[in-house]
Structures are given as structure tokens and as C-alpha cells.
Amino acid sequence: MRINCPYCGARCLEEFTYRGDATVKRPESIDESARDAWVDYVYLRDNPAGLHKELWHHGAGCHSWLEVTRNTVTHEIVAVELAAKGR
Amino acid sequence: MPILSIRKESGSVSNLESTSALHGFAAPGRYGKRDGDAGVTASERKNLGLATIAARKGQEAALKAAIQSAYGADLPDGSTSAVGKGVRFIGIGPGQWFAVSDSLANEALADELSTKLQGLASIADHSSGRAVMRIEGPAVKDALAKGLAIDLDPRVFVDGAAATSTLSHMGVLLWRDGDAYDVALFRSVGGSFWGWLRASAAEYGLEFVTTS
């Protein structure tokens, strides 16, 4: 599998580290009432068969965090963006 | 005692001869195939000024203008390099560059960049932490291909092109200078690099020469 890094170009898998679901959002509140939201954020993940947005770190290259859209059935990668886009 | 006062005195650290990253295990000479011209020639570019430049938040445009004004080079937005007055600037990531200089030797490059780019970028001296090996010769691409998963075809890896990647699992920064390839590696893996190079270039004949 190769990932087409927006900065470096197409690179082989061993240059990257997988971080996981790119769509989870850290809860704003640290109150006890936000407990369920925290359990969801820390532990619960969907396991989709199909397109999945996920974070990869290009540790052996430009050190960018990437947001990769990958088909979990075929491993086809349909989009790669810098996670820091627009920031 | 403040470190600065040590560095400025005569006979100080900066006046010492730097030791080769391959000292003690790589002797100049011919390795591998003995007959014919060497297919690969390797040398160490010693006493280079090496430094990283990281743009401060919101200062990238001002940093580019300052580099253009001081060195006459356009900081590249991708993994390629631009050569200005005495300094090569190599893109290593968004908002980050690696600077290499012959004329601003050792820590002089980082010192000058820190002064000229104050407030625009963070500068880190890498001159004592990395070794730069120059690899060239008719079989250089075949030898490098044994450890590096980068397409070095001259149509895509043009003069000045650069890549941050791994070479036989060692993190390297590589750039093309004419027909030669410069490989910056951490000094601590100098021995591993030499072992890899000696084995990988053996079938083409390897000539190791010293420079500086």
C-alpha cells in the first residue's frame, strides 16, 4: 500500500504510522455529565466496511499529519489531505 | 561559565578539526569489484553548515521575503531545493527547510540565519549531528535503489530535487546536485550507512575518497 503524501508524493506504507478515526471530536466539557461523550471519544469506534476517514503520520518523511480517506474493503485510497489544512 | 564565552575564545570548540562520521571504520580506497572504473564514488562533505529553519506562525511570507533579500533564493513549497548565495535551502515539510552551506561552515550558518531571520523562524544547528555523504558515479542510482524507495529517474527526480525518506531503514534527507546525490544522515548511523553502502555498491566497484 502507498499513500500519496500531499508534500512528499507517493510513499510506501512503512514511512507512516496509523492513528485512527479522523472524525472523532474531543468533548469540550470535562464535567461528570460529559462522561458518555468521553467514553464514546476514547473507546467507541465504528467499524465501517467501505470509506473511512483516518489519520496517518508521515513520521519518516515530512512529519505531517494526514487525513486519509480509505476504503477498508479494498484498501483503495480515494483522498489524502494535510490534517492541518487551513490552519 | 556561559557556553558563548567558551565558543568565542581562540582555540575554542569551533576551531577544532571535526572528526569524520566514518572515522575508524571507513578507510579511503577501492571496495568490491576491482576491475574497470568504479561504478560508485563516495565522499564525505565535511565542515558543512547545516541548520533547520521552521517558520513562526503567520510569518511564512515575511520569512520568504527575508530569504530572498538576504540570499537571493525562493524557499520552495515542496520537497525540492533552491540555491542562493552560498546556501542551499531544501524543503523538508510544510513551513520547514534544511539549509546547507560550504562557505558558512559548521555552526556559522545557524548563527547567521538566527541573526537574519529573528522573529520570523526558529533555527536549529545540525552541523554536529549530521553527516553529509556525496554519492555519484555511473551506477549510483542502481546502488541507491537497493535501500531507497524513491524514484530517481532524472525525468522526475530533477536537479535540485529532494526527499526525506528512509535508506535501508535509516532516516535520511537526500537531494540531487547535478549528477551527484547528497545524503544527510544522523552521525550516529554512520557505521550502519557505511556497511550498507559498501555491500550495495560492491558489484559496481566502490571508490571511497575523503574530502575537505
Image (spheres, rainbow, N blue to C red):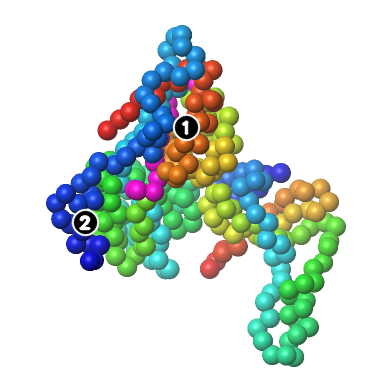
Letter of the chain that mark 2 sits on in the rendering: B
Q: Position of residue B112 (x, y in %)?
A: 25, 55
Kindly indicate the quadrant of the structure image that contains residue B131. top left
Q: Could you tell me how many numbered marks the image carries?
A: 2
Q: Residue B150: in sight, yes or no?
A: no
Q: For residue B207: magenta?
A: no
B59 to B64, vertically: above or below: below
Residue at 33 percent across and 28 percent down: it is: B210
Q: Quadrant of the N terminus of chain B?
A: bottom left
Q: CA distance from mark 2 to mark 1?
A: 32 Å
Q: Is residue A16 left or right of residue A8?
A: right
Cβ–Cβ under 8 Å for marks 2 and 1? no
Q: Is residue B136 left or right of residue A31?
A: left
From which residue to which does the magenta span run?
B127-139
Q: For residue B129: magenta?
A: yes
The answer to which of B10 and A58 lies nearer the viewer is B10
Q: Is residue B96 left or right of residue B170?
A: left
Q: Position of residue A72 (x, y in %)?
A: 80, 54
Letter of the chain that mark 1 sits on in the rendering: B
As drawn, the residue found furthest toward the top would be B35
Q: Of the residues shown, which amino acid type is indicated by label 1?
A: Trp
Kindly indicate the quadrant of the structure image that contains residue B17. top left
Q: Which mark is residue B7?
A: 2
Q: Which mark is residue B194?
A: 1
Q: Residue B41: in sight, yes or no?
A: yes
Residue at 34 percent across and 54 percent down: it is: B125
